[in-house]
Amino acid sequence: MARKILGIGFIVAGLIWGAAMQMRGETARAEAAGVGSTSQSVGEGNAPTFQNAHVERRPAHGTLSEEVRTWSGATKAARWLGYSVVAVEGDRTVCCSNWDGASHGCGICQLEHNHEGIDVNSNGAEKGTVQLEGSRRLAVLFRAEDGKIQKIRVFSADCVVDAGGKDALWLEGVKDSDSVEILARFVKTERSGEDGDESLGKSALTAIALHGDASAEKMLVSFVDPGQPEWLRRDTAFWLGAARGGEGFHALQKMAQNDPSAHVREQVTFALSVSKDPGAVNEMIRMAHDDTSAQVRGQALFWLAQKAGKKAVGAIDGAIQNDPDTDVKKKAVFALSQLPHEEGVPKLIEVAQTNKNPEVRKQAMFWLGQSEDPRALAFFEKVLSQ
């Protein structure tokens, strides 16, 4: 359900590094003749394979900020600039969204496509997937037109990209910390964060979260300072849970305990649910029990049911019995319905039989009816026969 809510699918990218190497000779001959080939490989695994593009490749000069400012300022017709950095650790491949409905692999990333989203895919989702060293790098691309940066795209460096006939400049030797610095400028100049997937600030934030450099960790932590805009704290919280491991969890724990906004803390409950850190469940249980906001407590219970299974039962049962807010009790009953049936159905029957709050009993009866479990049917038959 979490993947559906945020539109992040978990699929697997096919590796194309070997094919890229075979095409290097053709690329070199085409570039020497001044002709853009249909498909070009640059960077020996540190860059995507470009299709439908003429690619110029050269070392970066000076700082990345200077490079991008000079390049974009001189741009009239749309074109792309890209480079690669080390990706954050984790068993994942970052693909362009498969808006054509493809069910396996990344497919070809259409740079000029209207949809700007990404899919973060588990490399273990398909048998036979082999993780090569080249795919540990991340490609970052900027699109400029009429002197301004208009789009930022990010995906694993072993993807195939179609530039839609546009020119592309590929920079080699870019410092990862320089990349974080320039991307952070786009994040900090974002005014609202409500512009959807094509927002430069949100795209830049995603790119930073997927950088492996230590400067990315420090930047993300700075984004969740209580003085930062609420949209930025919420969006950063997700990436701290989804991509940043133990350090991300520690930042989320501080947010859970100290962030003044209940809306932000709600997002923290979800971020904890996607974190792989072993401490995440305990922090969710604490939030379900202790947070001052009934809405946050309810959200923590919901995500606990999705993540924790048996470990969540005690916290959910405690909320049904002891939380002072009836709405939180009802959300806790719903959380029981989200547990595996062998755990949730007996608890729902217990609540329906014994809870003193009629609204809570009614909620338990409703979710039992939705379960289609034989034990629920037997319970209803017993009640009706009395």
Image: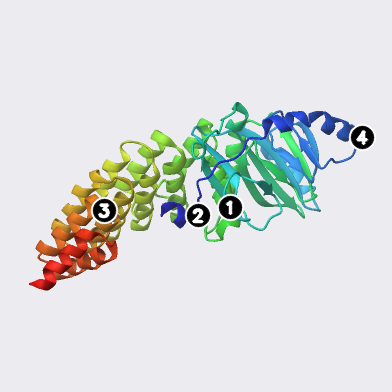
Identity of the amino acid at label 3? Answer: His
Task: Tell me the residue that label 3 is attached to.
Answer: 341
Q: Which mark is first along the chain, 4 or 3?
A: 4
Q: Which mark is first along the chain, 1 or 3?
A: 1
For label 1, the SS is loop
Identity of the amino acid at label 2? Answer: Gly
For residue 233, which numbered disc appears in the image?
none
Against 43, residue 103 (above or below) is below
Task: Tell me the residue that label 4 is attached to.
Answer: 33
CA separation, marks 2 and 3?
A: 27 Å
State the image coordinates of residue 172 (x, y, percent, origin top left).
71, 31
Q: Please say whether residue 88 is visible from this viewpoint.
A: yes
Specify whether 129 is left or right of 303.
right
Taking the spot 25% from the left edge, 66% from the top edge, the residue there is 369
CA separation, marks 4 and 1?
A: 36 Å
CA separation, marks 1 and 2?
A: 9 Å
Q: Residues within 10 Å of mark 1 (few under 14, many from 20)?
A: some
Marks 2 and 1: in contact by CB < 8 Å?
yes
Could you tell me which quadrant the C terminus lies in?
Answer: bottom left
Taking the spot 78% from the left edge, 37% from the top edge, the residue there is 40
Q: Which mark is first along the chain, 4 or 2?
A: 2
Q: Residues within 10 Å of mark 3 (few under 14, many from 20)?
A: some
Task: Tell me the residue that label 1 is attached to.
Answer: 117
Marks 1 and 4: in contact by CB < 8 Å?
no
Q: Which mark is first along the chain, 2 or 1?
A: 2
CA separation, marks 3 and 4?
A: 67 Å
Q: Residues within 10 Å of mark 4 (few under 14, many from 20)?
A: few
Marks 3 and 2: in contact by CB < 8 Å?
no
For residue 7, which numbered disc appears in the image?
2
